[in-house]
Image: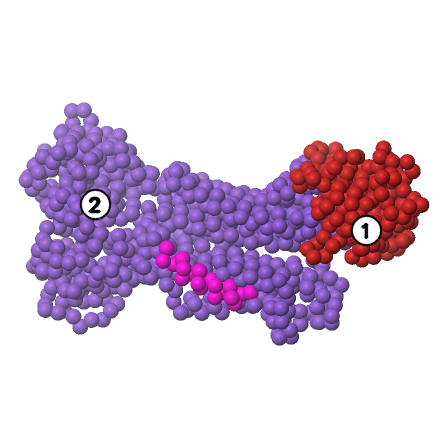
Amino acid sequence: MSLITSPSNVATKDVLIEARDVEFDFGQTPALRGANVSIGQGEILAVMGPSGSGKSTLLHCLAGILVPKHGEIRLSGERIDNFAENRRGALRRDTFGFVFQFGQLVPELTAEENVALPLLLNGMRRNDALGRAREWFSRLGIEGMERRRSGELSGGQAQRVALARGLVAHPKVLFADEPTGSLDSLTGELVMELLVTAAREDGTTVVLVTHEPRVAAYADREVIVRDGRVTSLTPEPAP
Amino acid sequence: MIRFGLRLSTRGGRESLTRIVVMALAVSVGVAMLLLTLGTINGLGKQNARGAWMSTRPSNEVGFSNFGPPPRASSTPSNASPTWWYVGTDQFENQIIARIDVAATGAHSLVPPGIPHLPGPGQFYASPALAELLRTTPARDLGDRFGGAEIGTIGASALPSPNDLIIVIGQSAHTLSRITGAGTITSFATSSNSGGPDTSGTTGLQIVLGVLALVLLFPVLVFIGAAMRLSAARREQRFAAIRLAGATMRQVSVVATIEALVAAIPGVVLGFGLYFATEPALVHVPFSGQPLESGDLRIGLINVLVVVIGVPLAAAVVARLALRRVQVSPLGVTRRVTPRPPRAYRVIPLVTGIAELAYFVSIGRPASAGGQIQAYLLGFFLIMVGLVLAGPWLTMQGSKFMAQRTSRVSLLLAGRRLSDNPRGAFRAISGLILAIFVTSVSVGVISTILTDHGATSSTTLASKTVTDQFAFSRFGDVSKVPASVITTLRTIPGVTGVTTVYVAPKGLKTDGAITDINGLGGSVQYGLVSCAQLASTPALGRCHPGAIYAALGDDVAFMPVTKSVTIAASTIWPSAQFSNGLNRLPVQLVAVATNGSLSSIEYVETVLDRAFPFEGSTSLFGEVNPNAGQLLKELQTSSEVIILASLLIAGCSLAVAMAAGVSERRRPFSLLRLSGAPLGVLQRVVALETAGPLLVIAIASALIGFLASYLFLKSQLGLTLRPPGLTYYLIVVSGLVGALSMIASTMPLLDRVTRPEDARTE
């Protein structure tokens, strides 16, 4: 088994998103130094590593939030790192979903309005968007929370609302950055189970950044980012 | 703790420094606006004081018995000999000329301010603006009214405004002693509220302007409050960290106070700098219709102390109050539960105030003047209180309605934000609502009265007809108009007719009731006129076919105050049975119809002024009372200036509130943007949160202001509200555009603080 992930040894037809020789720095501080990673269609990939290793930076590069200084990001074979910000924004809105550690819900909106946001941003009518959003509440076990504000939800409930928001528009890729970082272990596991189940049901690819092995265990495959480079711990998708 | 607070504020790194600089800048703008507002109030007072000498009334007016309160003067004791004194007004091309006739009674007679000594008979001093006008205008149009030789100009210390037209004419004591209304004075009034004639057009105006300027203070104070709350959310997070380190709430309060002072004190200093930099330009703003003198806007020591002590004190209080609204626990800052929504009872005072004014429309105004004042003041007071109280409730209802129905993300986010904290959203514009309401009432009432008077029209018959009326003057009726004057008037190019209206004898028989347009009843003198002459001045009305004499109503004799002079033109006056010679009757009015050219009008006024220098008051028939018209126009100008200023100040407040709101929601906004929400959506959110209430409140308070003025005009004056002129709309639109531009100027901040690449996701 090769420890270094290389795009060349991943079957092109399976790869949904990949980073090739990506380099990024924050001024004088290098964050990624030739990172390579390929993620297959429907795969759940855990990106692990110690604090400051560059795992969040890698996620941001893959999601089109940061533009690598060198290297390429490809989605379904198409290079996306050279897209203009507007186009990358549209990609994030239409093709990707996001779940962060905390603070992503808009405090003034109700939980169902928060979930419906991506649909409304895509121009869906209010009633249709809210109807679609409400389906996720029963799916994620938070029925009855639809009209609550984020301040009236527990941490676990808020993360499930955030998860619903990340998945409601059926993105191709869900980027989750420490989604259980602010939760206790039991709640964290519940959220991860829901995330994985929902992603599997919808065939959504998940890129999961975490430093917790228990969370990473939910993934199909784990990679470690260390000193700006990606090391694979588990086999890559078979050609 | 104080030293710790200071260290925390000043050595908190770049972010801390930026926060202090932004707050200090915002406070400085607020302080500058406050100082300029106070300066404007002071300036109007100084303008008033400079013109007060013209309000002096002799204590022994010749023939004075029927009009006004007993004369008074003398607030400055003097050992000088008395001076004969007579004050009148004239008009040239819609500008008021204050005319003061003086005569010495001894070698040390009292000398008015601004001139070295009293002019002798045949001499005069003119204000620089009038002197210039005399130099550039043909004598027959202006100079001949006064005669004599100019021996100098009146100094600036005696002029309310550099543009004022004032003349001090020397007469002999013998001449003035025979003039009704003249008298001797031994000192000058120091305030134009002393009951004297409104020669400079500033009496009363100053008081109203003072009140209007006070209205400006509300938006300014709201702005300063908004500036002080800037960065409150970020501060609170830091306070939680201090609590975690073991600080008590009391210690946190001290730190918060120190931080507020650290920003407020340099803000005050900068504000004074801004004030001194902008003050010279502001004197040119015609706040009272006339520019102020250089230095008028200087503030006094008390003002300085109030600002220097008051603003930092207010900053400290606001900081402590802001802390009361949050619970700073060692584990973080949590806003207290969503504030209780405002209740519907808040609209009761507003509805009651409107209902009260409407009630008087249905039953008519109260009979007594005191009753009228009480009724209308109560109504307006209720509406003003009601607007401030109802504002948050209306904001909440409107935003809820919007948020519950929209499919647009920007409307949803803005609507929810506004309905979540309608008091906070309304706070930034609460000052504006009162300013717009008060000024809209004032503009509505003034526009209607001015339009009703026909003063703004230059094409009506009334505006082409010059009248010299004697009945309304203090001097009684003129016994005779010399034939030579009538002949001269008829030969002036452009004059199409001359009519002399005589005082109708008691018991005059007419073939019908005399039209009483103003409803003044029978306590007035009616006029008697030859129908042959009346036909040559159609602005005064018509006779029945074949009639020889007609009896004119008080609307012509007294010059209507509230009813349109155009009514007079269409009136057919009742025929009068009269057989004696008209020439035996005292003259009430001379009316001269012209072709409307300025040259002919001024020439006619010059001839009439020369013939009757101390009797009557010459003006266009359309300009019912030149002083009143001037006063109303000045009030309208002031109202419009205040509308513009309050909108711009509200724009500043909203820009600051928006910056604070963006800073407070930096994380959810940047994560939204990171998730693909276009920047335009977020821009629309903050624009709707700020510009939406601004536009709605400005329009709503203007409409309620016009509704209130409609009800007032209808019940008190029997008039229908006329829409204000184009200038009003231009000013409102300019103010709104200015305010929106200020809000728009903070948009780059939104882009900068929510950039996806800078977002922290963990």
- State the residue position of label 2: B92
Q: Secondary structure at mark 1?
A: strand
The residue under label 1 is which amino acid type? Arg
Q: Position of residue A142 (x, y in %)?
A: 83, 45
The residue at the point 22 percent across, 71 percent down is B77
Q: Nearer the viewer, residue B510 or B698?
A: B698
Q: Position of residue B521 (x, y in %)?
A: 28, 42
Q: Which residues make up the magenta segment? A: B263-281
Is residue B594 shown above or below B761?
Answer: above
- Identify the mark at residue A80; answer none if there is no mark: none
Instruction: State the hue of chain A.
Output: red
Nearest to the eye among marks 2 and 1: give it: 1
Structural crowding at the residue carrying mark 2, measured as other residues with C-alpha within 10 Å and reported as few (<14), some (14–19) or many (≥20): some
Q: What type is the residue that disc 2 sits on?
A: Phe
| Residue at mark 1: chain | A
Q: Which mark is residue A229?
A: 1
Q: Quadrant of the N terminus of chain B?
A: bottom right
Snapshot colouring: by chain
Q: Is residue A123 left or right of residue B55?
A: right
Residue B235 location, quadrant: bottom right
Residue at image coords 55%, 65%: B263
Cα–Cα gap, marks 2 and 1:
89 Å
Colour assignment, chain B: purple
Residue B431: image location, x then y, percent: 50, 53
Quadrant of the rendered image containing residue B462: top left
Q: In what element is the residue under mark 2?
A: strand
